[in-house]
Amino acid sequence: MVLHLPSRPTALPPPVAAPEGSRPSPRAAVRWLAGGALLAFVTSWVGTTVLGLQHDVFYLVYFTLALGYLGWFGSRSGVVWREVLRRHAWWSVAVGVLVGLAVVRQVLGQAGTPHPDGAYFGFELVWRGLVYGTVDALILYAFPAVVAHLVLRGNRRGVARKLGYAGLVVALSLLVSASYHAGYSTYRGEEMAKPLIGTVLMDAPAVLTGNPVGSVVAHAAVHTTAVVHQFEGGGNHFLPPELTSDYPDRPGGWAASALAAGWLVLLGAVVALNRDRLRTAWGRR
C-alpha cells in the first residue's frame, strides 16, 4: 500500500518576472513615477489653466499622453501584468465596489446640476464617465501600485512587507494625485485636501489585496455617477475641469465628440495591431 502525502501548494509566480538586468531598479521605478507625476501636472495645468481647452478636447489630450506614458512604462517595467491583476482579483473588486458605493452615495447626497440630453449625454457618460474614470484610476492608483511592486521586487510576503507595500502605495499615489490636481485651479489651497482624501480611499483595494483593479472599478463608477448628477461640478469637484462660470463650456460640442470618437477608434486599431506585443506584456507567449 502506497501512501500519497498531500503535496505542498504551488507558489504563485511572481508579478515581476523579468530578469533583474532587464527591469528598472527600485530607484529607477520611482523616477518613472516622478516622470508620470510631472506629466500629469503639466497636462492638467497647460490644458485647463493655460489654454482652457473645451473639456472633451482636454480629455483627449490627457488620455493620449497618460496612456502613452503608461504604455511606455509597461513595456520597460518587466511586470507580468496577468500576475499582478489576477491575484486576489475578486477581493480587490469587492473592496472597490464597497469604496465606490460609499463615494457614489456621497455624490448623490450633494446638490445636482443639469446635464445634456440625447446622444451627446450618452457620449459623455462613456467619455467623461467611464473612460475618464478609468484613465484617471490607472495613472493615480494602478501606476503607483505597480511601482510599489517594483520597489519591493515583487515580494509582498509577510506582514512587514505587506504593511510596507501599503504605505508605499499610499505615499506614491498621493504624490501623483497632488501633482495632477495642482494643475487645476479648482484644487488650489484648502480644496486640495478633497482629492487627496479621495486618493487614500481609492487606494484601499491595492492596499488590502495588492491588486489595484478594484480602484479602477470604483473610480469609473464615481465618475459616471458624477456625469449624471453633477455634470457642471459639485462640492467635492469630482469632474475637473468643472463647467462653472470660472471655466465655462468652450465651443466644441459635436466637433469635440467626433474627435473623441475618432480617438477611440484609433486606440482600438493600435491595440489590434499590437496584440502580439500586448500578449507578451500580459504574460502569455
Image (tube, rainbow, N blue to C red):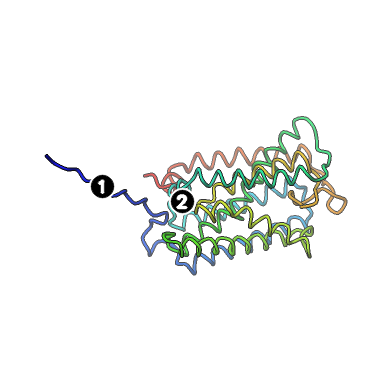
User: Residue 36 appears at what percent x and percent y?
Assistant: 59, 60
Which residue does the image show at 80% across and 46% down from the upper left? Answer: 110
- Is residue 20 rendered to the left or right of residue 123? left
Q: Is there any visible trace of residue 35 in the rendered image?
A: no
Q: Residue 7 carries which label?
A: 1
Which residue does the image show at 65% across and 56% down from the upper left? Answer: 199
Q: What element carries label 2?
A: helix
- Is residue 190 rendered to the left or right of residue 210? right
* Mark closer to the chain start, 2 or 1: 1
Answer with the quarter of the image where residue 131 lies: top right
Query: Residue at label 2?
Result: 84
Amino acid type, label 2: Val
Q: Is there any visible trace of residue 282 in the rendered image?
A: yes
Which residue does the image show at 44% across and 59% down from the upper left? Answer: 156
**In the image, farthest residue toward the right:** 245
The span from disc 2 to disc 1 (Cα, nearest Å) is 25 Å
* Label 1 crowd bin: few (<14), some (14–19), many (20+), radius 10 Å: few
Q: Quadrant of the C terminus?
A: top left
Q: Nearer the viewer, mark 2 or mark 1?
A: 1
User: Residue 102 appears at what percent x and percent y?
Assistant: 68, 46
Identify which residue, 131 or 8, lies in the foreground: 8
